[in-house]
Image (cartoon, coloured by chain):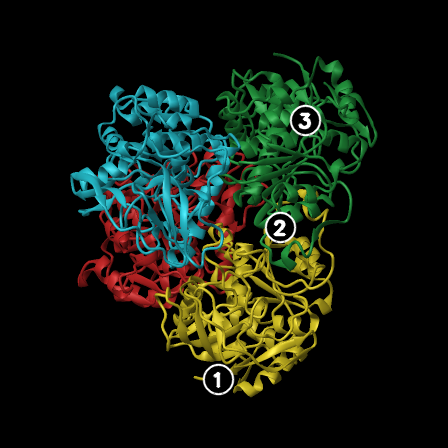
Chain colours: A cyan, B green, C yellow, D red
Amino acid sequence: MKGYAMLKIGESGWIEKEKPACGPLDAICKPLAVAICTSDVHTLWEGAIGDRHNMILGHEGCAEVVEVGSEVKDFKPGDRVLVPAITPDWNSLEAQAGYAMHSGGMLAGWKFSNFKDGVFSEYFHVNDADGNLAILPESINTVEACMLSDMVPTGFHAVELADVQFGDTVLVIGIGPVGLMSVAGAALRGASRIIAVGTRQVCIDAAKGYGATDFVSYKDGSIEEQVLAMTDGKGVDRVCMAGGDCSTFEAAVKCLKPGGKIGNVNYLGSGDYINIPRVEWGVGMGHKDIRGGLMPGGRLRMEKLAALVTTGRLDLAPLCTHVFEGWEHVEEALLLMKQKPRELIKPIVKLAD
Amino acid sequence: MKGYAMLKIGESGWIEKEKPACGPLDAICKPLAVAICTSDVHTLWEGAIGDRHNMILGHEGCAEVVEVGSEVKDFKPGDRVLVPAITPDWNSLEAQAGYAMHSGGMLAGWKFSNFKDGVFSEYFHVNDADGNLAILPESINTVEACMLSDMVPTGFHAVELADVQFGDTVLVIGIGPVGLMSVAGAALRGASRIIAVGTRQVCIDAAKGYGATDFVSYKDGSIEEQVLAMTDGKGVDRVCMAGGDCSTFEAAVKCLKPGGKIGNVNYLGSGDYINIPRVEWGVGMGHKDIRGGLMPGGRLRMEKLAALVTTGRLDLAPLCTHVFEGWEHVEEALLLMKQKPRELIKPIVKLAD
Amino acid sequence: MKGYAMLKIGESGWIEKEKPACGPLDAICKPLAVAICTSDVHTLWEGAIGDRHNMILGHEGCAEVVEVGSEVKDFKPGDRVLVPAITPDWNSLEAQAGYAMHSGGMLAGWKFSNFKDGVFSEYFHVNDADGNLAILPESINTVEACMLSDMVPTGFHAVELADVQFGDTVLVIGIGPVGLMSVAGAALRGASRIIAVGTRQVCIDAAKGYGATDFVSYKDGSIEEQVLAMTDGKGVDRVCMAGGDCSTFEAAVKCLKPGGKIGNVNYLGSGDYINIPRVEWGVGMGHKDIRGGLMPGGRLRMEKLAALVTTGRLDLAPLCTHVFEGWEHVEEALLLMKQKPRELIKPIVKLAD
Amino acid sequence: MKGYAMLKIGESGWIEKEKPACGPLDAICKPLAVAICTSDVHTLWEGAIGDRHNMILGHEGCAEVVEVGSEVKDFKPGDRVLVPAITPDWNSLEAQAGYAMHSGGMLAGWKFSNFKDGVFSEYFHVNDADGNLAILPESINTVEACMLSDMVPTGFHAVELADVQFGDTVLVIGIGPVGLMSVAGAALRGASRIIAVGTRQVCIDAAKGYGATDFVSYKDGSIEEQVLAMTDGKGVDRVCMAGGDCSTFEAAVKCLKPGGKIGNVNYLGSGDYINIPRVEWGVGMGHKDIRGGLMPGGRLRMEKLAALVTTGRLDLAPLCTHVFEGWEHVEEALLLMKQKPRELIKPIVKLAD
């Protein structure tokens, strides 16, 4: 079979590989659509997860099941499925402790295009099909379905980590596709005011649609000064971090009320330390929780989030700004994600309706 | 001063009373608008809280502050304020334990028209003004502001007790004004499917606007059979109870998945027991939590919920179906609530803009 | 192989069956010791789970692994293991939702001597060995190890459901072996006063050792009157229910403060309803949570609880009042559990050191 | 009246001040015993809270009520009381949000020897007597009662922040008096293994008594290497931080499993940032919560913790290594705390039995 792979750091291309084997709990799937993630860019061009050779890229997509193992009960060839970016080992100690995404080691629930071949391929392998696939509802098209692999669960997880409550004022830092889903998730958890940090017009427009009420640009001064000014010096109840870097935590802590919570889902690619400012963190005692976590994966999560789309609570169309048709456009879509033109939110490659 | 009072069970009318005195932490307020609650009907005609003589009725309203005590810091005469139906003693052990509404004894955070005179009066007394009042935002009119006293916090509290999560299927039993706010609250907490139990068209229309996706009428058969049929026998994740009686818990438990939660805010006026069906409650071990609680009161709650209105997340206009102008209409409004005509959601008496 | 089975309701005896087959994720184990549970009595003589024919009884024991499936990674023949009474399907939707004990349907995580043959057998089958077994620590003997299958996790789960906090006054209803573990668990969660309801001296002595500070006998009057008198009318913060029947919830609710929680782990064998008294439940709004659940099963739980034994926090010896040696004593031990003599806490049949 | 005061940074002595006035909600108290806190040392010699002139020191003690305000209901002159170091404004928005210790601003629930005169004085003022005092139980002596002001609630709060669960392996960094209470609190919350970091023999001995199972000295290498070696590379479930400095968080994060939590109650006196190591924090996504908070104050907390002492769950005698009698020893006790001799845990000045 053919797959679009990272050949080594900085180099990619189509390669030929053997179709993966299907263990007793597994499924083999054929993509219906795939989407490009910033993580693919980090992996390929920045070596974020170290060197990989001839590893097929991609962890966002929806698919058709073509084969299932002997122990799989709930899926069969021909089923059209949602596929989460994170596919945990559900019987691990970590999963039993409520942290399935770290089954097998910190972050190791992320397998596609990390420890094994990804989804930019004629066929791909899914471990624990019953635990990790979900039926693609008929009312969700294959393009938008790709947003459920990573963008929705990751953006919403920031909201869960920040523990948004009715009426909270929430700061969302970063309004790329993940941050937009944090805005949508915050609104769907009952936030009142949602202050979004971002500058690209396409993202600002989408953020307004998803429920942002105020905007801050880092070009207009420090985030903390602007946010404190906007809130009469009181600060915000919650911060969702879907952008920035290690130093951005300083702004987040400075904006936050005592008793507040920061939920980070942003990949931090460089620097030795996340810097938490000592004084504004209450010299250790300010009750400003610093939380960060990989999105939960698995079937239940997919089903729950898909239900938000089918009941009309969440509209994924605004994310899908660039849709290509056919495998031949994977490279173009990937390069687009690398260049990040101002009008881009998400590039998707559609292979079937 | 004049107030509209319960003279004894079954009899009401205008009476003359002394203007209440203002203690060091207190405020004296003058209503801008008041609303009638089903509880006023229970209190007056059903003797729900026992006999009361010449007690001024009413616990929903917004007001202008006319006097404050020596220790009050954040309010002054002339301030226009939101007034919660529940006004706890914030330094009580119950409040410190997180259950301020039970300060001074179970349910004793409810003071207006229960332990002391209510708000259907030229002037009324508020204990702990700093802890219990909130500034009325300019963008909220006096009529809709009355909905923040009880309807919004009570309806939303059912959602909190039921602990609605992203993508949950939620059953809301009862779609009077409180149940409508449970529908709105469930949608604002991330429910996907919301199944509402109710029959009056005005309420069904409002429920659709607030986010209900499916409807069940008890006239079409048992609630549990209809709900189980609608959910392929799986049942619902959460139940918000804003209507029914002691026996309705049986339907709720039967509809609920293991691991599910019931949040009741409905006043249960008769019967010896709430009946939880033994077998469907998993012979004691089904992990179906039965929760019920009086709404949280106080200032923070008012501020947070008002922020949902000012940011446009919550529209209170659909609740306010019957608006009267002037004190002389209090009795008419009260009788309307007793009769509950099909087109009624809430009667409000407006005294000032 | 031989197994001690329920032949039909009311009749039991040794039967010959085929050794179970081992699927790819499974293990076949050989008991080192087994214990009798009151549930075995309910199952056999009361038909609590309906009729069963030639079903091998027993769900408490520790064992040696004799065979593992192809996909099992962490266990191998010869390993000595703890075996939980509840062995969930870890990739189920229920497990992903945090309720693994209900995987496959309410209570269906309970498989041994319910849906399949139990552990009173030369060999028994364990589904998902990696997810459900745990290594038996060397410092725990085979007799006490049996207490980790059900008594410890069930008794401790009542404490978790009741959500005991530092300094709480806790009422434990029932001080058979499960209730004793609720006493121990409450003390280990930080309860201050622990009021235990029970009458048998052997249990009272053990309860004192585990941390009970006060005792109530239903022979001396109603539980609620005694408990309210002991607490100056204030009631208790938490109730753990490990005994009684459907009507006992009435006493529990009457004893409980607003904001309190009841955690039930007691099997309720008869009656149509659990009766929650309407008035003392705050006419629906008293914030007295009613919770009940089957113990969590699986490997992590076994490892965590075993660590309490190996670090000396929990002494299981007082539970093990009647130890038999050899398979031939299973029937005698079972009858002893049926008769429940005054000096009995738990009968165990030891097969190996 | 006389009080022992900070004259300016680095200078202290007895001064004469007016007896404080008693507002309507307040109490005036006369110490029965007082204890010296490391914070007194930080305040006086390190200028930790900035310069203060003629501010009476001390925030640990028990007392007799000598006067109460007109609105105080539950206390009267002659009552012997526990006094928490943190005395919140209970009707503040922060208290209503569950963070009373930050009422009036971050950390501002700490008033004694911070914003107003402390307890090293013939008389001291307590705001909101009903909300902040608790009756001193007869079975607790005045010396040990002082440990309930700060050492117990602060040490236990680290355990609450770290959210210790049954069977957890817990690392406690620092075993001065606060850290010892974290050890005791972790054992009382159900920890199995408790690894304590400390070197002084008197503290190690006390820690063993309180439940520590393993010890680590920073003199024997890095904390993280030792802890990881002790746990077969798996790390710990929880970390309580009651010692160290900003850089110690690095060790804590490196020791922690994904899904783990750090609870800090240690005052961080210098440095710009708390350094969270990026890689071991899972590049932002490791689910390692960083929490830190000032102890909860107030009456309920005092009552709950005192109940642990009266029921024999918690023995405070081992903390009280140095007891002086009479006001004239305050300076000696303070200097002792500054010098911290190897055999010191806590110096207390007893004024009455």
Residues at marks 2 and 1 on the same chain: yes
Horizontal side, residue D43 vs residue A234: left or right: left
**Quarter of the image where the C terminus of chain A is located:** top left
- Identify the chain of the residue marked 3, using the numbered disc in the image: B
Give x and y (percent) for residue D119. 39, 46
Q: Quadrant of residue B172?
A: top right
- Would you say residue B62 is visible in this rendering? no
What residue lies at 47% left-to-right and 70% top-to-bottom? Answer: C83
Residues at marks 1 and 3 on the same chain: no
- Alpha carbon separation for disc pair 1 and 3: 67 Å
Give x and y (percent) for residue A328. 27, 33
- Identify the chain of the residue marked 2, using the numbered disc in the image: C
- Residue A57 disc label: none
Give SS at disc 3. Answer: helix
Disc 2 to disc 1: CB gap under 8 Å = no
Give x and y (percent) for residue C120. 54, 78
Q: Mark 1 points at which residue?
A: C351
- Alpha carbon separation for disc pair 2 and 3: 36 Å
Q: Mark 3 points at which residue?
A: B203
Type of amino acid at the residue the image marks with label 1: Leu
Type of amino acid at the residue the image marks with label 3: Cys
Q: In which quarter of the image is residue B242?
A: top right
Horizontal side, residue D189 vs residue A118: left or right: right
What residue lies at 35% left-to-right and 25% top-to-bottom? Answer: A321
- Residue C257 disc label: 2
Q: Residues within 10 Å of mark 3 (few under 14, many from 20)?
A: many
Compared to residue D70, the image places residue D31 above or below, namely below
Give x and y (percent) for residue B315. 56, 22
- Would you say residue D72 is visible in this rendering? yes
Type of amino acid at the residue the image marks with label 2: Lys
Q: Nearer the viewer, residue B183 or D223?
A: B183
